[in-house]
Image: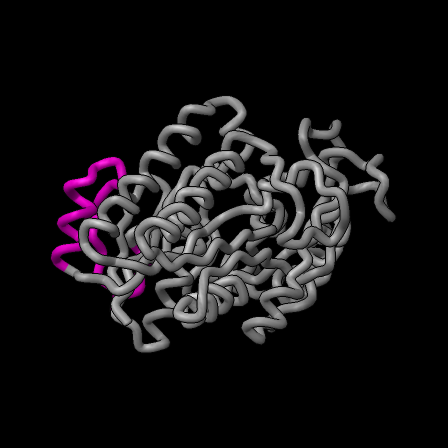
Amino acid sequence: MKILVTGGAGYIGSVATEVLVAGGHDVVVFDNLQQGHREAVHPRARLLVGDLAHPDAIDAAMRDFKPEAVMHFAANSLVGQSMQEPFLYLEDNVVNALNLLRSMDRNGVRKIILSSTANLFADPLKMPITEDERIIPGSPYGESKGIIERFLHWLSVTRGLRYACLRYFNAAGATAERGEHHTPELHLIPLVLQVALGQRADITVFGDDYPTPDGTCVRDYIHVTDLIDAHVRALDALEDGNRTYNLGNGQGFSVNEVITSARRITGHAIPTRVAGRRAGDPAILVAGSDRIRQELGWNPNFADIDSIIESAWIWHRKNPRGYAT
């Protein structure tokens, strides 16, 4: 299949491109390289440097490549930043997605996989969080993804679009060639590994008084290749109807458990310091992924935190500066 991957130079998008190329697909990456890295793009994929804010650039890519499907990863995706700069999310994420969808419609592309988010669920009534949970976005970032999900629904009704919304919890880990490199880095596992690499003195634990077994927040971590396996399965299943899935391991690991695992894997003491809670951080977020397991036969290959962190550690040791040259 010919697949256009937006944001394919970023962390998750570059791994998606790697997996798709390995599966025999013809892939074009469309990325403005503001957050992504040219070096992360698989050498057998074609990179088009372009911005979703420019409809003419998207149309040119569609006319030239003639994709059969789109995987849409490109977005501003920092929850905290979205609280400080809401228009960057409520405007850019939404308008850029609409530009993409308009171009798809003009060019007869009828399949899309959306990278959505667990930030749709700021106040879940039950845990694990299933797809039937009420949607109460936790930030302008979550709101932007919720709006795009509704776009897809109505374009399916009115224009015959086939779509899957895949709501991630915490993507982590690496392949042999591609890993996590953000500037600034805000995600727990790469931050912990930076301590082990001697790039920072310690790791800050935000709150140790939550109603959890060890007092620190609990999150559901999913290996990035397991995440992309879900994308491929969802794409293959679109002929049978639209899909919405929550993606996680179905079990949670606390901040302290992640740090303890990293100590085992790296052999480093990884000093910590405790700070106050961050506003908006719920105590526990765990995905209920029974629907995709039952419907598409998806099961994570990396079900424990040690294996996830080990894959990330191998990549970070090999690439201590990430993709920086």
Magenta-drawn segment: 39-64
Which quarter of the picture shows residue 319?
A: bottom left
User: Could you tell whether 173 is left or right of 213 in the image?
Assistant: left
> Looking at the image, is 211 positioned above or below residue 316?
above
Residue 244 visible in the picture: yes
Front-most of residues 35 and 98: 98
Residue at 17% in and 61% down: 65
Residue 306 x, y percent position in the rendering: 68, 64
User: Could you tell whether 278 is left or right of 231 in the image?
Assistant: right
Front-most of residues 325 and 302: 302
Residue 193 x, y percent position in the rendering: 60, 51
* Magenta span includes 15: no
User: Could you tell whether 95 is left or right of 234 in the image?
Assistant: left
Residue at 71% in and 56% down: 263
Front-most of residues 228 and 14: 228
User: Could you tell whether 314 is left or right of 241 in the image?
Assistant: right
Residue at 36% in and 48% down: 155
Residue 111 x, y percent position in the rendering: 34, 60
Residue at 55% in and 52% down: 168
Q: Quadrant of the N terminus?
A: bottom left
